[in-house]
Amino acid sequence: MCVAEKSSELFCGMTRYSLFPLQKRGGFVHYSIRISIINYTEKSLMDRSRIRNFSIIAHIDHGKSTLADRLLETTGALTDREKTNQFLDKLDLERERGITIKAQAVRLKYHADDGKDYVLNLIDTPGHVDFSYEVSRSLAACEGGLLVVDASQGVEAQTLANVYLAIDQNLEVFPVLNKIDLPGAEPARIKQEIEEIIGLDASDAVEASAKEGIGIHEILEAIVAKIPPPAGDAEAPLKALIFDSWYDSYQGVIMLVRIFEGTLKKGDKIKLMASGRSHEVLKIGAFSPHPVEFPEMAAGEVGFVIAGIKVLQDAKVGDTVTHFHKPAETPLEGFKEVKPMVYSGLYPIDSGEYDALRDAMEKLRLNDSSFSFEPENSLALGFGFRCGFLGLLHMEIIQERLEREFNMELITTAPTVRYRVITTKGEELIVDSANKLPDVQYIDHILEPFIVAAVHVPNEYVGGVLALCEEKRGIQREIKYLTSNRVMVVYELPLNEIVLDFYDRLKTVSRGYASLDYDFLDYRPSELVRLNILINGETVDALSLIVHRDKSQLRGRDLVERMKEFIPRQQFEVAVQAAIGNKVVARATVKALRKDVTAKCYGGDITRKRKLLEKQKEGKKRMKQVGNVELPQEAFLAILKVKE
Amino acid sequence: MSSLYIHVPFCRTKCPYCDFFSVTGQSSELTSYPERLLQQLSLAPNRERLQTPLTTVFFGGGTPSLLSPTAVATILNALETWPGIVSQAEISLEANPGTVNLENLLGYRAAGINRLSLGIQSLHAGFLERLGRSHSPEEATAAFRQARQAGFTNLSCDLMFGLPGQRRKDLMKDLEALLRLEPEHLSCYGLTVEEATPFYHLHRAGGLPLPEEETYRELYLSIQDRLLAAGYTHYEISNYARPGHACRHNLTYWRRQAYLGIGAGAHSFFPVGWGERWSVPPDLAAYAMQLERGEDPALMLESFDRRGAMAETLYLGLRTAEGVAEEAFIRHFGEGVMAAFPAAVARCGKHLALQDGYWRMDLAGWLIYDHLIEAFL
């Protein structure tokens, strides 16, 4: 046992299970690591008819993680000591948000009512729209899925999106109504909704409460009965799908694979078809949930493969593993490079922390190939990084991990998307930061990314959602009444409006009842301009934004008013302006400080009053000096929100 | 050490803006209090500290005028005996106008008090009531005249401004009335809402309409205009005096000179190392108990390092018109103000200047003193 203070091993592969439980003491995440990881070897189960590969499809908060834990408990995979909630969610951050960020596969042994032993591979999926590609690969590894729906909340947009993904991949999906014990549960209505909205037969849906342990046995039996065993030919050339991979500091890259064709043995030389790299298989096994090593795995099975791969980028999710000497002719379908959609600048508040920030980011990237960063320099903020994320949630997660696990104090600039700028010379520039936008005279036109967004919302909030989508420059595609009370609103929207404050606003207009799913659509020409923020006449580059021309004035006015509230008053007046080029579109003034004095200061006051000032000064250490004005973090955050 | 502060933490009623330590309705404790003070004074560490006769003694509160002239005389007689009081010593007593009459004023004078500080605060009945003061404007002016009659030639008045609803002309009326009394010294305090006072809670509940910053500024500047014209010097942010009448005791605080404080809630500053500040906990029962056991109730509040001492020297010294002498600063700390605090000096801009060997804050700087001085801390 040893105690680590760094979090880079949070996903440390073979040792993953023993990281649990995480405990935070004094700001550090402490966990134990068992170095001798694989304790015994057992023969992998070769009878494909006894294998069931499935995943759980659920909306955030609908109880997926709790259900997964119950399945682990009931099948005896977890010891009593391990029966802490949500075994599959490893990071405390994940646990706090109630979402699973990384996929994981657990092998459960189940002695079914028919008297036979089965192997159930539960393939966990991330539960957020930012990670939809990972979800699609996890689903591709399964034959079936449990659709878990909150018995009082009903079907949500994101659930629907994942169910469609599953159905498209010919998965056998059967519904489970969770939280049946809650007073607001309406199983009959929800069943009807599932049938109407998704078209799934919900007549024999299992009614369960993962929290109370109700219906768990029925779910296990349904998995055995309803989900077909995997097909595939163990003698065919190897085709294994990587549906998750991560970096472990002791083992290198660990891949989770589903073997579709052929057999993979320890010592085999393998080739990754997309990256073209070849490696030798060092270990094969499965998590049950503790790692167990096998000599080989054949078609239909799910498990981990360790092949001495040093960089995560070499074992991308969606890639196909085949034999080097007897390769498959074609890879499995569906591989795609996941590219960041949202960009923002991350700067250390203390510029002396630049190197520490880079180290921290490198550690995070070891386990997150979809997070990218490159050095960036801002006049206002000094040295920092321009970072790319899959989406806003991904961005928040990275930020929070940097702050919590690495104790970084950060200033984040407004998130932006990738624009394609066609210059007057006909060149195309990719612009992921307002400061990289060329001057107006060099721009012929700008293209911005559009998405298609599906919002599910109860009837009474449709008006608010429509107004929001219109305000966000949306183009309506469809309004569909799924049931008498549930509506699906489909809009084409510019992604830059989504990254701004769309989620928050959507929550507000629907009182939290709307859910959102979106897909990238295309790039479209758009009237975009750079909006600069000037403080006492000086442009603060880190506050510049790319906005639609029609909105620039409104946005500018809102921004300067908001900034004004956050800029502490100084000895002099501070002018906050929003400008497009040389044209000022909005102005606000932070009045000069006119009185700030302790009237009485005698013997008894001296220490106490001086300490008050010292404390006040301490609070200002988190400020960034811009020209002669001190800007607090909040002023930078102000730019992320728009007044409603 | 030649300055002594005596804290008298008793009041008839608590004023809603005051956060100094004092208790009400404990007359029995008041009776035994002078004895306790002398007990504290006679403790070994204090005997060691007080090696030279006192040049200033200050009875502060609370309401020191709740002590009888006899009690004051007992204390001062003891001090005469040891460590002694120099002949030109400044011996001040704070008095609430509602607690004095010609008789006890004569008694204080006879006991040796030679400077009286009257907590008049306002001469407007309505504002006095809002401030929770127990005296009327008439009582206040009468107290002043009686003090003169009693032979006090060094009188100070407290005046508060920036009161909720106070207009400039209300203040100027107060000021004119005070000037007619011709005090030697005036302390003019802008009302400050201190935490854990009734005013604090009232203010948080929105029930205390304090003046806008701009109004405060105007009132502050009007006071200075008027008092300079009347021949007073503005020698500290809130203090004015006729030439030669600046409060010598209070100047020891701002000059960061040593003083011993006795009484529950009193503070001391000792020139040990880079300076130590001590305080007696504001707890009368504990105070009495410890003294009975012969223990020193004072606790060390903070001990300074060089940097802290430098910062506090400026924090206190720049409150005064005298300012901080560069040469003395260098002599004491081994480097000049600019060398030690370049960024903070720069932040003060034109408000802080070195002239004739002294660093001084200008009037506009005093108005935003906390904002500017913070940079040195």
Image (tube, coloured by chain):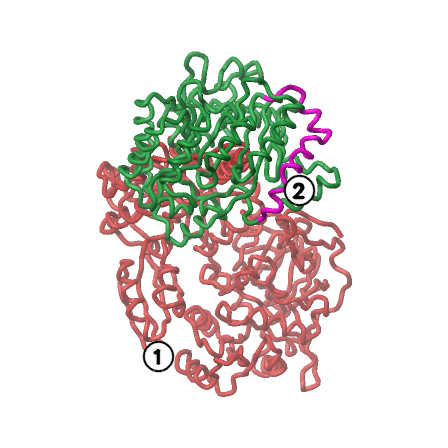
Chain colours: A red, B green
Given the current orientation, which residue lies at the most extreme front position?
B103
State how far apart marks 2 and 1 are (Cα): 73 Å
Q: Which residue is mark 2?
A: B287
Amino acid on which the number 1 mark rests in the picture: Asn
How many numbered discs? 2
Residue sitting at 75 percent across and 67 percent down? A42
Query: Which residue is at the front of the view, B371 or A533?
Result: B371
Q: Is residue A579 above or below residue A242?
A: above
SS assignment at label 1: loop
Residue sitting at 29 percent across and 39 percent down? B170
Amino acid on which the number 2 mark rests in the picture: Tyr
Q: On the same chain: label 2 and label 1? A: no
Q: Residues within 10 Å of mark 2 (few under 14, many from 20)?
A: many
Q: Residues within 10 Å of mark 1 (few under 14, many from 20)?
A: few
**Magenta stretch secondary structure, dominant:** helix
Is B53 in the magenta? yes
**Which chain is mark 1 on?**
A
Q: Which residues are magenta?
A: B26-54
Residue B256, percent from left and from top: 55, 24
**Which chain is mark 2 on?**
B
Q: Is residue A430 visible?
A: no
**Quarter location, residue A376:** top left
Q: Is residue A436 above or below residue A96?
A: above
Q: Which residue is mark 1?
A: A485
Query: Which residue is at the front of the view, A478 or B343?
Result: B343
Query: Which residue is at the front of the view, B64 or B348?
Result: B64
Tell us which disc is closer to us: 2 or 1: 2
**Could you tell me which quadrant the N terminus of chain B lies in?**
top right
Query: Which residue is at the front of the view, B365 or B340?
Result: B365
Residue B87, percent from left and from top: 57, 17
Q: Is residue A399 above or below residue A68?
A: above
